[in-house]
Image: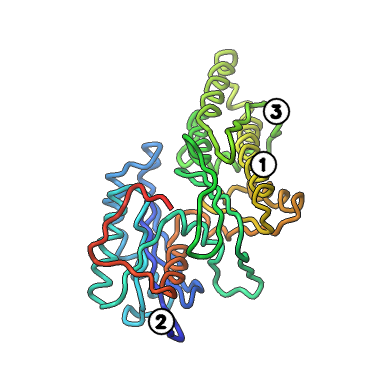
């Protein structure tokens, strides 16, 4: 389709954040996110509560996105939405609204894989003059609470997983470690905060090293739990007295495991550009480690703005724009998928 200005509304509702974004030819005009604080008291996301909150938030969030972008619903050319993977109840809210809205407006519907969108978040920008997008092909380390993957991006429509976690995700390792330390949910950002003041070599933990380009973090979580339990038996104030060093050490180990495979993947594939994506890509330690890796391996490094690291609709809208250009549309009988591999 050859249209001078293409406006895409993106809707993201895969977990506990309700988000809507409007893009024009792939440039982000708005990106509104409604968080759900209710899950903090439970120490993790409660699926039923998440889906109910999405129902309350989705219309106000979409209205805010359109208003902020100064775009009317009549100007939209397509609706892009997260089909999966994610929580089924949450996905149903976004999918149902997207289908109904597209049908009412008489415009195309575009389904987006949430994890592919994370990779393409490296193209999300608000038109900044200094912004540079990665050239194809590039290698992306996608790290979130539910996924840890190495993705080879050969084009906007050709993304393939060449390595992934065989059990738990790195983001889950951060959050579970924080929970063991008694930190509130979500604990990953708090570990990053305290780690900045600690010694990353204070407490050595085993670095998981799986075959080929795969990851594993379940063993590390168990090792960390046993270590903390043993230390607390000897000193009930151990966590309080050593929190910075503990956080720095576990963060160092998780990042070391990620970089170990990232480095191998760069060598195996021979790529000249690398990127990171997903919620954990907001971690300051990981961002520095990947930047340092780029210098060491002499490859270009691309890191999304913080706004596009966690779950957000801008990445859905950007991915939707690429699909729009390829006339890659969905039909009204489409359904969400809790499990949705590349």
Task: Give the position of the N terminus as an image quadrant.
Answer: bottom left
Q: Residue at x 35, y 67 (%)?
A: 110
Viewer-nearest of labels 1 and 2? 2
Q: How many marks?
A: 3
Q: Which residue is mark 3?
A: 202
Residue 95 percent coordinates (x, y): 29, 60
Hey, which quadrant is residue 92 in on the image? bottom left
Whether 340 is drawn above or below 180: the answer is below
Give me the C-alpha separation between circle 1 and circle 2. Answer: 49 Å
Q: Quadrant of residue 64?
A: bottom left
Crowding at dot 1, Cα within 10 Å, few <14 / some 14-19 / many 20+, comes out as: some
Which residue position holds label 1?
Answer: 196
Judged from the image, the secondary structure of the residue bearing numbered disc 1 is loop
Percent coordinates x, y for residue 339 in the rendering: 35, 47
Residue occupied by mark 2: 1
The colour scheme used here is rainbow
Image side of residue 152 versus residue 260, left or right: left
- Within 10 Å of disc 2 (Cα), the crowding (few <14, some 14-19, many 20+) is few
Q: CA distance from mark 1 to mark 3?
A: 13 Å
- Measuring from the top left, give residue 250's x and y in whole percent: 61, 33
Residue 196 placement, left or right of 124: right
| Label located before the other in sequence (3 or 2) | 2
Disc sitting over residue 87 in the figure: none
Mark positioned earlier in the residue sequence (1 or 2): 2
State the separation of the CA atoms marked 3 and 2. Answer: 58 Å
Residue sitting at x 65%, y 42%: 259
- Circles 1 and 3, Cβ within 8 Å, touching? The answer is no
- Which residue is farthest top? 234
- SS at circle 2: loop
Query: Which of the marked residues, 1 or 3, is nearer the chain's N terminus?
Result: 1
């Amino acid at each position: 389709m050859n249209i001078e200005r293409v406006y895409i509304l993106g809707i993201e509702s895969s977990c506990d954040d309700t988000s809507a974004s409007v893009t024009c030819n792939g440039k982000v005009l708005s990106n509104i996110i409604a968080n759900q604080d209710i899950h903090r008291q439970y120490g993790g996301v409660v699926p039923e509560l998440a889906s109910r909150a999405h129902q309350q938030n989705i219309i106000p969030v979409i209205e805010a996105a359109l208003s902020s972008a100064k775009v009317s619903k009549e100007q939209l050319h397509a609706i892009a939405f997260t089909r999966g993977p994610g929580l089924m109840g949450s996905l149903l809210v976004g999918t149902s609204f997207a289908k109904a809205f597209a049908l009412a407006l008489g415009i195309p519907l575009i389904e987006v894989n949430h994890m592919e969108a994370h990779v393409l978040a490296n193209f999300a920008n608000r038109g900044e003059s200094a912004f540079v997008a990665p050239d194809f092909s590039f290698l992306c380390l996608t790290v979130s609470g539910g996924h840890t993957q190495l993705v080879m991006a050969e084009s906007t429509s050709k993304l393939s997983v060449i390595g992934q976690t065989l059990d738990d995700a790195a983001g889950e390792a951060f959050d579970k470690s924080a929970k063991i330390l008694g930190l509130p949910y979500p604990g990953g950002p708090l570990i990053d905060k305290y780690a900045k003041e600690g010694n990353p070599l204070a407490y050595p933990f085993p670095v998981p090293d799986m075959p080929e380009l795969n990851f594993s973090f379940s063993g590390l979580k168990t090792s960390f739990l046993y270590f903390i339990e043993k230390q607390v038996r000897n000193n009930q104030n151990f966590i309080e007295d050593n929190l910075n060093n503990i956080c720095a050490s576990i963060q160092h180990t998780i990042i070391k495991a990620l970089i170990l495979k990232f480095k191998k993947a760069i060598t195996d594939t021979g790529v000249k550009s690398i990127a990171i994506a997903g919620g954990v890509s907001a971690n300051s330690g990981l961002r520095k480690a990947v930047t340092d890796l780029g210098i060491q391996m002499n490859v270009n490094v691309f890191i999304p703005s913080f706004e596009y690291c966690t779950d957000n609709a801008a990445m859905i809208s950007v991915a939707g724009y690429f699909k729009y250009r390829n006339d890659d549309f969905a039909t009204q009988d489409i359904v969400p998928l809790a499990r949705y591999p590349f």
